[in-house]
Image: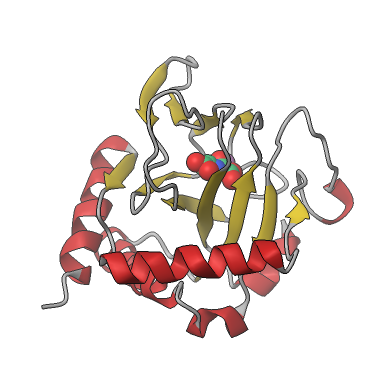
Amino acid sequence: MCNHPIVAETISASIVTKGYAVVDNLLPKAELQQIQLRFEELQQEDEFLKAGIGKQIHFTIDNTVRGDFIRWIDSSDKSAPVYKLFEYVNELLTNLNRTYFLGIKDYETHYAFYPKGKGYQMHRDRFKTNPHRIISFVFYLNENWQKGDGGELVLYNEETEAIETIAPKANRLAVFLSETLHEVKSCNTERRSITGWLLDVPTELTFLG
Ligand code: OGA
Ligand code: NI
């Protein structure tokens, strides 16, 4: 049976009450493995670019703030194995709109990897020059992650006290309000994920700020 609506409702309810949600074992093993293979293929094809901060005229690359490499996922990729993840994203989007009236119109996603020793300093995904990101989600691909590997996602409250530390374990989906302060701890081994944002405008209009 398809459990997408149940998972989506659980995530939505948790976001509304706590501001975030964590779901483990999201996909069947075979589907996860296909995504992991696709990720490796893209790395071998050298498809990743150094990630920057801000957009358009605000775009800068600052290695001290964020150390990841990214590859955006476009519509041609949506038939690739990540499609299985997007089924959940679509259901979540529908649920958030129907039950909680969030007015989500679209989403944008990229593959990301952090080389050993890199992280992403405390930041928000929603801010003045990028107000359209409403919900952030990250699907982790790190098989056999263990304590000491680092790269945890830490969520903070407005007093910058840590409220949750989330290990980037394979097949785990973390979802949080994009306005939340958060950080990616420096990792001691390469860290892979698919990161995305639910938007309140169609993706092609995010530049409007
Ligand atoms: C981001 C981010 C969190 C993570 O890409 O903006 O905060 O756990 N990612 O990868
Ligand atoms: Ni972020």
Q: Residue at x 84, y 48 (%)?
A: 59
In screen coordinates, is 198 left or right of 147? right
Number of numbered discs:
0
Visible in this render: residue 127? yes
Q: Nearer the viewer, residue 83 or 179?
A: 83
Rendering quadrant holding ligand 1: top right
Q: Residue at x 50, y 16 (%)?
A: 160
In screen coordinates, is 46 left or right of 183? right
Q: Residue at x 56, y 28 (%)?
A: 188
| Residue 14 horizontal/vertical position (percent) | 24, 44
Q: Quadrant of the N terminus?
A: bottom left
| Residue 126 horizontal/vertical position (percent) | 59, 44
**Colour approach in the figure:** secondary structure
Up/down of 134 relative to 64, above or below: below
| Residue 174 horizontal/vertical position (percent) | 37, 46
Q: Nearer the viewer, residue 104 or 125?
A: 125
Q: Quadrant of residue 119?
A: top right
Visible in this render: residue 94? no
| Residue 202 horizontal/vertical position (percent) | 59, 73
In screen coordinates, is 114 left or right of 33? right
Q: Nearer the viewer, residue 104 or 68?
A: 68
Up/down of 208 relative to 128, above or below: below
Q: Residue furthest left?
A: 1
Q: Quadrant of the C terminus?
A: bottom right
Q: Residue at x 51, y 32 (%)?
A: 151
